[in-house]
Amino acid sequence: MKDKAHIVVIGTGGTIAGRGASSVNTSDYACSVLSIDEVLSGIPQAHAIARVSAEQLMQIGSENFSTTHLLTLGKRIDTLLKQDDIDGIVVTHGTDTIDETAYFLHLTLKSSKPVVVVGSMRPPSSLSADGPLNLYNAILVAGSETSHGKGTLVVANDEIHSARDVVKTSTFKLESFRSPYGPLGYVVEGSPRYYRTPARRHTLSTQWSIDAIDELPEVGIVYAHGGIDAAVIDATAQSGVRGLIYAATGNGNVAAHVVGALQRARRRGVQIVRASRTGSGIVIRNAAQPDDEYDWLVVDDQVPQKARLLLMLSLGSEQRSADLQDAFYRY
Ligand code: DGL
């Protein structure tokens, strides 16, 4: 019989490492205060299913994650995955930007070994804390042969999500993590069960490798609303960004009075990408706006915060608009 899988759990902070003064407060607490060893001490059951090693790489709320943090985390995971004696990685992470970090890893890691990013909505000090079971399940998923080759995964609330699709959708509910096409599978009675696999390219089949990336160009997001001021677009375009994701209303509609500002930004060399603030659905090229004529791009079905990461990576390796557009259809 094969030995237990060796899983490295990397702590980065978040609510899963938080502590509140009251066990009934699930929103008012300090996050990122417990060490990864303290977090793991809450689930001694994990040692029955895996050989667990832990390391504290960071201790921050995920709203503080920058490009530098993404690169530091990605490179550390890359180093660990290259070791023959390590079978999988679990990253404990704040939930605010868990979808962004997981997607970045999904696009840049060069391994078929499982990488699972996990967080919790309630701190360990609260009644019905979700962190302990989420973390146990994440270790289980990372140690399972069935998780190989599926890209980076996010495990929460008994569900296994693809990093490409998952988004945090609620400020406080346990069922906050949603994928527009549903999770890849569930953790049921102590074992992962998959029902589908990611269709788009990830990890070994992408054009990026984390060990070759040392910096990324900046890309900004402008969130549309009724009465939006074109000055916001001008200011973003002049801030040094190489791309601007316009989180438009509905299916990528752009108010007539800001079309000129986006065209000005494009003439400055800033790539303009039409996205949607709705949270799901497809933005069709040349439908709501003449993208070919303006030399703008569309996100396909990607949410603005992940479209930003994809454009940052794409701009680092491609310059032609056609290639950048193609990336949104490939990944
Ligand atoms: N500070 C937030 C973060 O780290 C807390 C939210 C959470 O972890 O659930 O993302």
Image: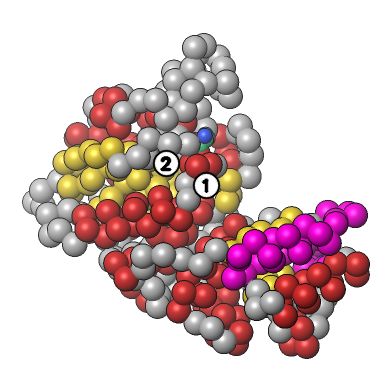
When the figure is inspected, residue 192 is found, relative to residue 106, above or below; the finding is above
Specify whether residue 84 is painted magenta: no
Ligand 1 neighbours mark 1 (CB distance < 8 Å): yes
Residue interval drawn in magenta: 225-254
Along the line of sight, which residue is nearer the eye, 302 or 134?
A: 302
The residue at 19%/35% (across/down) is 48
Q: Which residue is mark 2?
A: 93
Q: Tell me if residue 98 can be seen.
A: no
In what element is the residue under mark 1? loop
When the figure is inspected, residue 322 is found, relative to residue 199, above or below; the finding is below
Q: Which mark is residue 97?
A: 1
Q: CA gap, disc 2 to disc 1?
A: 8 Å
Residue 211 in percent (x, y) is at 29, 67
Residue 290 in percent (x, y) is at 80, 83
The residue at 81%/59% (across/down) is 231
Along the line of sight, which residue is nearer the eye, 84 or 271?
A: 271
Ligand 1 neighbours mark 2 (CB distance < 8 Å): yes
Number of callouts: 2
